[in-house]
Image (cartoon, grey):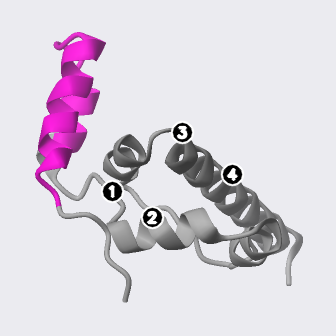
Amino acid sequence: MTTSNASTLAEIREVNLSYLLLAQRLLQEDRPSAMFRMGLSEQLADILASLNLAQVVKVAASSQLLCRFRFDDHAILSSLADKEKSAALAHTHAAILMANQPAGQIG
């Protein structure tokens, strides 16, 4: 394994750990809002919220990114990046577009 490859894998693990810890914190603070913001199904939210620290660290050690862009729709990304719109309007428009997308599913 090259140094570059090892560094990339370490960065992926770091992002995964941060993402999982953020997801758990958001789910504890305001579950419905967290599910909406992260595009989580009820089933996936239940699993994430129930992981203990050892399980979170183990899952984070995956060589695959656990998070993904929700910008599959060109309109969402364009709305967020639109320089003509104010930031608040762009975020509101993107939230409306993302609300129409299905929540992530397991399996």
Q: Which residues are magenta?
A: 76-101
Of circles 4 and 3, the one toward us is 3
Callouts 1 and 3 close, C-beta under 8 Å: no
Q: Residues within 10 Å of mark 3 (few under 14, many from 20)?
A: few
Of circles 1 and 3, the one toward us is 3
48 sits to left or right of 96: right
Specify the amino acid type for callout 1: Gly
Determine the residue positioned at 55% across, 52% down. 23
Residue at the disc numbered 2: 45
Q: Residues within 10 Å of mark 2 (few under 14, many from 20)?
A: many
- Label 1, label 3: how far apart the Cα atoms are: 16 Å
Q: Which mark is residue 69?
A: none
Q: Which mark is residue 29?
A: 3
* Among the two numbered marks 3 and 2 on one chain, the one whose residue lies closer to the N terminus: 3
Q: Name the residue nearer the viewer: 59 or 30.
A: 30
Q: Name the residue nearer the viewer: 12 or 34.
A: 34
- Label 4, label 2: how far apart the Cα atoms are: 16 Å
* Among the two numbered marks 4 and 3 on one chain, the one whose residue lies closer to the N terminus: 4
* Among the two numbered marks 4 and 2 on one chain, the one whose residue lies closer to the N terminus: 4
Is 52 situated above or below 94? Answer: below
Q: Which mark is residue 18?
A: 4
In which quadrant will I find the C terminus?
Answer: bottom left
Residue 45 occupies quadrant: bottom left
- Label 3, label 2: how far apart the Cα atoms are: 13 Å
Is 64 situated above or below 74? Answer: below
101 sits to left or right of 14: left
- Residue 90 position in % (x across, y down): 21, 23
Residue 50 occupies quadrant: bottom right
Q: Name the residue nearer the viewer: 100 or 26.
A: 26
- Label 4, label 3: how far apart the Cα atoms are: 16 Å
* Among the two numbered marks 1 and 3 on one chain, the one whose residue lies closer to the N terminus: 3
Residue at the disc numbered 1: 39
